[in-house]
Image (cartoon, rainbow, N blue to C red):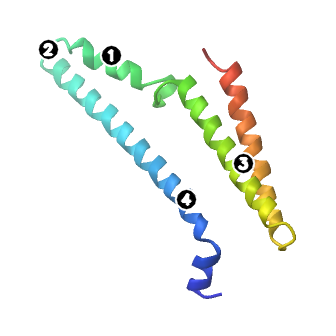
Amino acid sequence: MSIGEFLHDFWWLIFPVFGMIMAFQGSRTSEHRVRNTIDLIKTYTDQGKEPPPELLRIVSQELQNDGEVQRGSDRNGSLWTFIVFTALAAGFGTGWYLTRGAGYEWAFLMITVMMGVLAFGALVVLIFGRK
């Protein structure tokens, strides 16, 4: 298989790779923001001054249990996760329907089932998750 055939057959891989790159970049940006805020608070405390409450509020909002970074509203994030996985399941389900009998429809069916399970999990988190 040449590189041209590989790119022709697996062009769709660019989407998950792009998603992983964007998730990594978002994580780095969030960590950098928290680290800069903590450094600024250290500067205030080294000078013997009380840090502004806005800085303390930013850090307390950003940091969750054990230093994990909290991203936005959990409820809103769960809703978007459900919408995205449902749309992906519908899209791959359509791909499965259109390629029946072509010999590779099992790949679309497998991805459809996985996206459907993930959509169901996101729905459960949306309904029963933290309020």
Residue 7 in picture, x, y percent from top left: 57, 77
Residue 69 in picture, x, y percent from top left: 45, 31
Residue neighbourhood size for the residue with mark 4, other residues' Cα within 10 Å, grouped as few (<14), some (14–19), many (≥20): few
- Residue 79 is drawn in which quadrant? top right
6 vs 93, left or right, is left
Residue 121 in picture, x, y percent from top left: 73, 34
Vertical side of 121 occupied by 8: above or below:
below
Residue neighbourhood size for the residue with mark 2, other residues' Cα within 10 Å, grouped as few (<14), some (14–19), many (≥20): few
Residue located beneath label 3 in the image = 89
- Residue 56 is drawn in which quadrant? top left
State the residue at coordinates (73%, 27%): 124
67 vs 41, left or right, is right
Tell me which numbered mark, 3 or 1, is placed earlier along the sequence: 1
Q: Marks 2 and 1, how far apart in space?
A: 19 Å
| SS at mark 2 in the image | loop
Mark carried by residue 57: 1
Q: Marks 3 and 2, how far apart in space?
A: 56 Å
Label 3 vs label 1, nearer the camera? 3
Tell me which numbered mark, 4 or 2, is placed earlier along the sequence: 4
Tell me which numbered mark, 4 or 3, is placed earlier along the sequence: 4
Tell me which numbered mark, 4 or 1, is placed earlier along the sequence: 4
| SS at mark 1 in the image | helix
State the residue at coordinates (41%, 49%): 25
Q: Marks 4 and 1, how far apart in space?
A: 36 Å
Quarter holding the C terminus is: top right
Quarter holding the N terminus is: bottom right
Residue 37 or residue 11, whichever sits in front: 11
Residue located farthest toward the right when viewing the structure as drawn: 101
| SS at mark 4 in the image | helix
Residue located beneath label 2 in the image = 48
Residue located beneath label 4 in the image = 15
